[in-house]
Image (spheres, coloured by chain):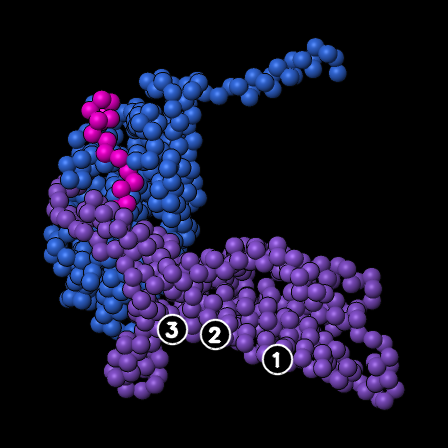
Amino acid sequence: MRHRTFFWFIAPSLAAMILFIALPVVSVFIQSLHVEHEQVLRTVENCGPFGCSEETVIDRAATAELRAAQPLGRFAGLSNYTDRNHLAFSELATMWERSDSFADFTRRAMTLPFWRAMAFTLTFTFVVTPLVLTLGLAIALGVNALPRVFRGPTIFVSLLPMIVTPLIGSLVLFWMVDSRGVLGAFLQTLTNNPDLSLRASPTLTWIMLIVYGVWSSAPFAFIVFYAGLQTVPEEPLEAAMIDGANRWQRVRYVVIPHLMPLAVFITLMQLMDNFRVFEPIVGFQAQASATSLSYNIFNYLRGDAAQFGAAATTSMLTILGVVVLLTPVLIRTWRDFNRKRS
Amino acid sequence: MTRTFRLAACASVLALGVGAPAAADCGIGAGSVSILGNDFPALQAVVAGARECAAGDVSVSANLTSDHRDLQVAALTANPSQYSVAVVANGSIVPLLNAGLIRPLDGLVERHGAGLQPSQLVRIEGQVMAVAFMANAQHLFYRSDVLEGAGAQSPETLADVLAAAEAIREAGIMEYPVAMVSGAGWNLAQEFVNLYLGHGGSFFEPGSAAPALNSDAGLAALETLKALTSYSNPDYLTFDSNSTQALWEAGEVALMLHWGSRAAGILSGENSPAEIVEATVLAPAPVVESGGRPATTLWWDGFTIAANTSDADAEASFLAMLNGLTPERIAANSELAVWLGEGFEPTPASAGVLASAQGGAAPYPMQPYMGLMHTALGDNLAPFLQGAASAEETLETIEAAYTTAARAQGFLN
């Protein structure tokens, strides 16, 4: 394809990407360099149903003047990135000095919103992604081995977790693991511990969220692998059988290498998706034990005072995190591509 | 089917469609009223009254949702604003005031508000900015039968509550007799605010936005909170108002700190057996020391009118809301709330809130930076209760989180 033709071919999607992805990212970046104006405060007398009292209010006229002069807010450089809500270097240094052991330091660092969210986000990403890959492949191999009549219904049932809206799915599970719910009560009987509660302990909450993550994403891996399995050529499989390979060896040395490009694709998607984990934390009301970067953004923007600077900074750090996570996979794909071309 | 019958059927369907309640005369010529507010029975009754004004050129619509706090600033910033009326509480009016999104009501009150009590007018710097219509506060609910069975006295102080909980546990009646609206986040922070003010603490240095949490009162409030939650079901960090009300109605708890606005629902006996309802006692919020200030905060709910709406719509909105607050309507709905307007007859359901107010409970603080403090509390209390941080560390963490937010919002340098 000539370059000119190629350009016109992708121009519409390029324009859409600049408009809907690049420009908003730039705008969020600019936002992350600013903090709100200084608020001019005054003390006035307020009265209400419970009597009168001296209260502090914002002097709106004076604040509006400041805002008109600098609509974006005060320029703060990278201070949003280094403050306590984000990278928190100085807080970490103080904590390091005060801690008597590494465990103590970790415990203290877990009070910093960004690092606390990072700890859960990374654990979630690196536990859920491989589990989804393995489980998805296992289901695909299982379904592929079924007699044809049963395949349709089995595929439908296996896809259900993906069809359910994430927030609804997590709410359903949340009620099931309640100590009076069917799963929670079953676990209590099983362990013979009437006080066992999946929602009470941070460790169990993490496990519950990870199980939910695998449950909701495995169908995606399954359907991609299943489609891939339909393209596995018969000849190498038959040749392997003649060579005396058992079922496991055929999967390991013929099927899996054939599905490798799909595995890379699923890994890419899963790394991105799991890094942005959000709905289960809201659905399971797990914020006491687990937060993620996306949850932090939501938390900054919600409620009475929307903290745009902090939300924008967390967003930029999330993008940075996704880039760092995807780089190894992308480099690998790029090398494969070049090798094939040469 | 005969032709006549078909005609008759059509006519009856049409009649059903048109058969809306007769429009009340609210004195509105024309205008459009749209209401944003929280969702609870008392407010639904007020909005039902406002809706009766809909007729001819007057349209009334309402969006009642528990997410109203998250919507209100954006919805009223639009010009013309999405809603002409925002129903707020003393906590949630602050962001609207901060951004100048609601209009002074002095003129409207002068012309139409003769029936309002002076105490209903919320004056900020002398200007009426909201009309309060009901009061709310968290207070103590207890089960007289369970306490009797455990040989406990009716609790007055926080120590009494803990002693009663221990007695119930000792007697083997309930393992987790206490419930609070203690879900991590806003709810848990509200429990701390109640206990902290009950212990005589104040959140900020006088006349400044600097935090003043790290005090003896702060430590005492944290210890009390931990002691109370040690008698709560281990899931307590996921409890909201609905789940604790359900625990009470299922008879699983015997001592509960809950919102007064839930009392009517609990006493209605719709979801619980008669013996639970009969044994439910509504008591004032517990005090720290006998004769002290109840450990709760008083809230008012009231309506405000958007600044970015036409004067005609503002007047229509004011009149429609007043039609929702007539003495007859308040009298008819007395059991739903502690109404501030004329016509209210105290009912058993209002006993807890009224007793707490008479005991001298503090109103919820209205400083413009209190919302940031509430958020900082909600985000950082859980590790202390889970045993991952000491009380001193927790107070330090909350102050640091608040200071960071207050700096970014321009309240501190």
Crowd band around label 2 with a 10 angstrom C-alpha radius: few (<14), some (14–19), many (20+): some
Q: Are marks 1 and 2 on the same chain?
A: yes
Horizontal side of A164 relative to A304 (left or right) equals: right
Q: Nearer the viewer, residue A305 or B186?
A: A305
Q: CA distance from mark 1 to mark 2?
A: 21 Å
Q: Assign a secondary structure to mark 1.
A: helix
Crowd band around label 3 with a 10 angstrom C-alpha radius: few (<14), some (14–19), many (20+): many
- The magenta segment: B98-113
Please tell me the colour of chain A: purple
Quarter of the image holding residue B339?
top left
**Residue B66, horizontal then vertical, whole percent:** 40, 45
Q: Assign a secondary structure to mark 3.
A: helix
Q: Which mark is residue A122?
A: 2
Q: Type of residue at label 1?
A: Arg
Q: Is residue B104 magenta?
A: yes
Q: Is residue B280 magenta?
A: no
Please tell me the colour of chain B: blue
Q: Type of residue at label 3?
A: Trp
Q: Residue at x 56, y 17 (%)?
A: B15
Q: Type of residue at label 2?
A: Leu
What residue did someone put label 3 on?
Answer: A115
Q: Nearer the viewer, mark 1 or mark 2?
A: 1
Q: CA distance from mark 3 to mark 1?
A: 29 Å
Tag 3 and tag 1, C-beta contact below 8 Å: no
Q: Is residue B210 above or below residue A245?
A: above
**Residue B241, horizontal then vertical, whole percent:** 37, 50
- Which quadrant, please, contains the C terminus of chain A? bottom right
Q: Residue at x 33, y 57 (%)?
A: A307
Q: Which mark is residue A332?
A: 1
